[in-house]
Image (cartoon, grey):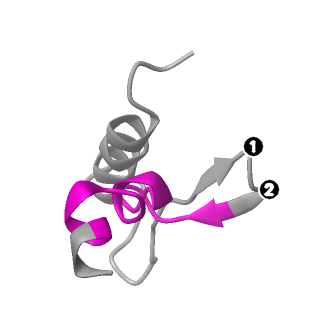
Amino acid sequence: MFADVDATALRQVELLRHHSLILAPVTIHADVYEVESGRLRLPDQRLSDRVNTREAMARG
């Protein structure tokens, strides 16, 4: 397993974007599959970082 799947996904995107065999008009991005929810998300957009935080609870 990866220690940080988000960082690994972003690192792989950067490697592909700068690869000499991949030409400029190609769009490259990453998605992370969350097993718990069965959904795809963009790296660094963890649901747990946005809900049930002290700040979110204070805002109501």
The percent coordinates of residue 53 (x first, y second) are: 31, 56
Name the quadrant of the C terminus. bottom left
The answer to whether residue 56 is magenta is yes
Q: For the residue marked with disc 1, what is the amino acid?
A: Val
Residue 38, label in figure: 2
Reply above or below: 45 against 24.
above
Residue 60, label in figure: none
- Residue drawn at point x = 40 percent, y = 43 percent: 6
- Residue drawn at point x = 24 percent, y = 56 percent: 54
Q: For the residue marked with disc 2, what is the amino acid?
A: Gly
The percent coordinates of residue 31 (x first, y second) are: 55, 60
Q: Is residue 55 left or right of residue 46?
A: left
- Residue drawn at point x = 39 percent, y = 35 percent: 8
* Range shown magenta: 40-57
Query: Dot 1 corresponds to which residue?
Result: 35
Name the quadrant of the N terminus. top right
39 or 54, which lies in front? Answer: 54
48 or 10, which lies in front? Answer: 48
3 or 24, which lies in front? Answer: 3
Reply above or below: 59 against 49.
below
**On the image, which quarter does residue 12 sit in?**
top left
16 or 47, which lies in front? Answer: 47
**Category of crowding for the residue at label 2, using alpha-carbon neighbours closer than 10 angstroms: few (below 14), some (14–19), many (at least 20):** few
- Residue drawn at point x = 45 percent, y = 77 percent: 27
Residue contact between numbered discs 1 and 2, judged by CB atoms under 8 Å = yes
The answer to whether residue 16 is magenta is no
In the displayed orientation, state which residue is furthest to the right: 38
Q: Give the structural element (helix, strand or loop) at label 2.
A: loop
Q: Is residue 18 left or right of residue 13?
A: left
Q: Is residue 47 left or right of residue 14?
A: right
